[in-house]
Amino acid sequence: MRNRRLKVAFSQYNNESIDRGDHSADGWIDEQGVRMEGADNAVDLAAWYLIQNGALDMNGAFEPGNYYYTDYLPEYDGEGTCTQKQYFLEGFTKLEEKAIYELVNAQKLLRSGVQTWREKQAS
């Protein structure tokens, strides 16, 4: 059994660090990674995990080794600090990484389409 997992890191930003063009803190939340084994399909489980955590693909186009990240605003603490999480695929084949990318982006397109539909219904 392969050791497929999602490693989770973070970067924090505040007004001072943004002025410097840097982050105020960064590091690992889970360097060992969240295991995707034990599921019928580790690809589906990884995509579901990324979607449930609000992750987006970094490059906008598939490339092996892509990582995923969250938006800053959902992790804003109201004190001027916001946190971004990054998710790194570990132990997946290139074909599995591509399948995860396609599932995550299909969900993103679906959410975008629903939002557009709602806006049209409201007008």
Image (spheres, rainbow, N blue to C red):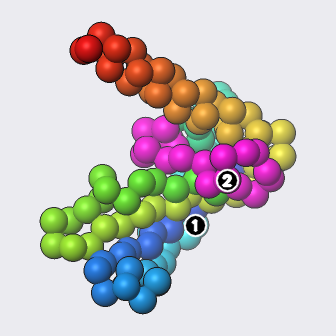
Is residue 39 one of those drawn in magenta? no
* Magenta-drawn stretch contains 59: yes
Find the magenta span and give its range. 49-66
State which quadrant residue 123 falls in: top left
Q: Secondary structure at mark 1?
A: strand
87 or 7, nearer to the observer: 87
Q: Position of residue 110 (x, y in %)?
A: 51, 23
Residue at x 30%, y 78% (from the top left corner):
14
Taking the spot 25% from the left edge, 62% from the top edge, the residue there is: 76
Which residue: 50% across, 68% down? 9
Q: Give, as a three-letter code, the residue at label 1.
A: Gln
Q: Secondary structure at mark 2?
A: loop
Camera-nearest residue between 57 and 6: 57
Image quadrant assignment for residue 42: top right
Whether pointer 2 and pointer 1 mark residues with C-beta atoms closer than 8 Å, the reply is: no
The residue lying toward the viewer, choosing from 32 and 74, is 74
Q: Which residue is mark 2?
A: 59
Give how far across and how far down residue 108 sits, in percent: 52, 32
Task: State the mark number for residue 32.
Answer: 1
Towards the viewer: 92 or 116: 116
Please give the name of the residue rendered at 29% of the width and 80% of the height, measured from the top-left corner: 15
